Image (cartoon, coloured by chain):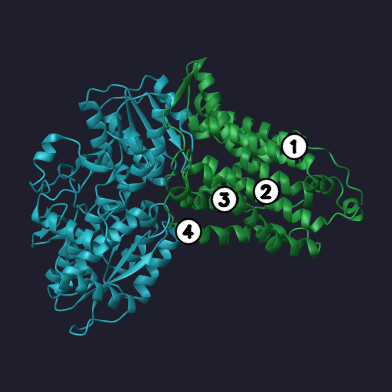
Chain colours: A green, B cyan
Amino acid sequence: MTIFLQLVASGVAVGMIYAAIAFGYQLTFATSKTLNFGQGEALALGALFGLTLVPFTGYWLMIPLVLVFGLALGAVVERLAVRPAIKIKSEYGWIMATIALGIIFKNVAENVWGRDDLKFPSPLPETAIEIAGIRVLPMEILIVAGALLMMACVEIFNRKSIWGKAVVATSNDIDAAGLMGIDTKRVITLSYSISAMTAAFAGVLVAPVTLTGATMGAVLALKAFAVAIIGGLESGLGVIVGGLILGIAETLTGFYISTGYKDVPGLILLLVVLSIRPVGLFGKAVIKKV
Amino acid sequence: MTVTKRAFVGALLCATALGLTPAQAADPIKIGLTGPYTGGSSSMGVSMRDGAKLAAAEINKAGGVLGRQIQLVERDDEAKNEVGAQVAQELINKEKVVATVGFINTGVALAAQRFYQEAEIPVFNNVATGTVITNQFKEPDYDSNYVFRNSAYDVLQAGMMVDEALAQGHKKIAVLADSTNYGQLGREDIEKYLAAKSVKPVAVEKFNIKDVDMTAQLLKAQQAGADVILAYGIGPELAQIANGMAKLGWKVPMITSWPASMQSFIDIAGTNGNGVIMPQTFIEDQTLPKRKAFLESYYKTYGVTKIPTPVAGAQGYDSVYLIAAAIKQAGTTDGPKVRAALENLKEKVEGVVTTYETPFSAKDHNAISRNMVVFGKVQDGKIVYAKPEDAKNAGVVRTKEKSSN
């Protein structure tokens, strides 16, 4: 039983890493029906930027600076890659454009920070603590708490602030929101900024446990994308559940079936969800009027 | 190294970069230098390159080979098989190199070296360890084999790792390997050697490059009652294994393939990496004059206090000396003659790994034999001798055993 719980605990930590990244996909999809496929690179840039700041500011003071960096990065992505595509009503232009920007960001990061995997100094002790026979790293607890806190903050912002309400209105019906006097273009920019901000924050949050480097986001962002599809691209709760499902499925499969097949159940689940419930477990089925 | 020597090295590097030939010599002898200078294995590639450049600079300062200067033509293969194949063709057809040294990644070596074989140009693996590398063009299928190597190949490392585990009295062995060519070929070698010793591993597990969580693999090994872990992989993931063991509060000895001496392992594993042992051909110690001179000039030339991956630096350095000796003996840069000279090298070549006495024969293209490889141990950010007797004998040059490969 302890083993099972240990596997679940590790799965939860990994799953929350995925969820924290997947959350960013959900934010932009809600407002503009577009995604930033460079989310993994935003994560890596956030982590590397944070790594550069840490010696001067320490871990905790670095976080607000990384958040600002993420906001700016998201605005850049939206202006360069997404807005032109939306303007000409291109259905797919943003896909190529965000992927291209992601590649550019990766190359820039490789030139600035090199291509080695770097160690991110952990703000918490690196010795595991034991809770009822299960051993977890303090950093893993921080990841879970930090990710949940981040999601809660974004939700509160959306529900309480005037800007957040504009975001929600745009998500519900972009045309109606526009007619009500909401500047939907700026709302979309804002959603990209918040999305990249969550990615950058996720970057500095997970970096002490994963490795830090220009390519750190590649595998993680792909898994996070699967999580967003499983959970539903329009649901914040969905990505948490999706992340936990995928993370726990990976560790359990690794132990009870084979470590060689660790990634298989998550992908099978993805296919099953896509064929049975294409909007995801928590997605709202929308009827598209033509 | 004196100031003038440094100035010379600098001048030479500039000259190479600009594609100029040093004034006093005839046409330079072009030798290809290929490895990953960017990407995940770049710490190995860059150490290898810098070691090779030092050797070339020293040879040139002493008058070059056949009265001509050596010019290293550097190309980044990015650890990608297809780029390696392109680079090989460029070096052969455009740069007209007379030999090439390099290759960190087994996959790249296998993809690229057939072009050298076809062009009858010797190609020298100084870091890649896949056992199959020197067997790819072996007799009798091919008339002559143009592939040489001065790194400790996988069968040799796998055998050492298993023997060490058994010698320490471990009965229950868990094998962890990454899912790349490198890891899986190494795992096969370990399993074969274990079978020969009629030991069955209690667990054989796999992990992927960039995996962040090793809990499942380690718990399986732990539940199977493993009392030692043999891990085949490269720096970052080996470090995640060491960190994962610390997290689970499970402490058994860990014996890894040689890349645990990479700087990334030392940085990422931190104190969790202490005590991990791995086969090494070279440890940064200054016991022999040749090694002392090599290390001092490396530190000075590149402004570092430690070679990022010492084994790669030392093997890169030696590979250039071996090729130079063969060209000298052949009296020409003609590929088949240089190959023949390598297979019957008369001059003793004093390198930093060892002193090479007839390192190759027509049948044996591996310069490193098992007795030349020692166990290194990670200790507080450095790689030191794992065994006191090796440390004591550090000043003794371990030469190749006859017919050991």
User: Residue A110 — which label?
Assistant: 4
Subunit of mark 3? A
Chain bearing tag 1 is: A
Alpha carbon separation for disc pair 1 and 4 = 35 Å
Badge 3, how many Cα within 10 Å: few under 14, some, many 20+? some
Look at the numbered disc 3 and give the secondary structure of its residue: helix
Residue B300: image quadrant is bottom left
Q: Sequence-wise, which precedes: disc 4 or disc 3?
A: 3
* Residue type at numbered disc 3: Leu
Give yes or no for contact between labels 3 and 2 (Cβ–Cβ under 8 Å). Answer: no
Marks 4 and 3 on same chain:
yes
Q: Do the residues at discs 3 and 2 belong to one chain? A: yes
Which circle marks residue A65 in the picture?
3
- Which mark is first along the chain, 2 or 3? 3
Report the side of A159 relative to B400 (left or right).
right
Spatial separation of the CA atoms under disc 4 and disc 3 = 21 Å
Figure check: B83 above or below B328: above
Q: Secondary structure at mark 2?
A: helix
The first of marks 1 and 4 along the sequence is 4
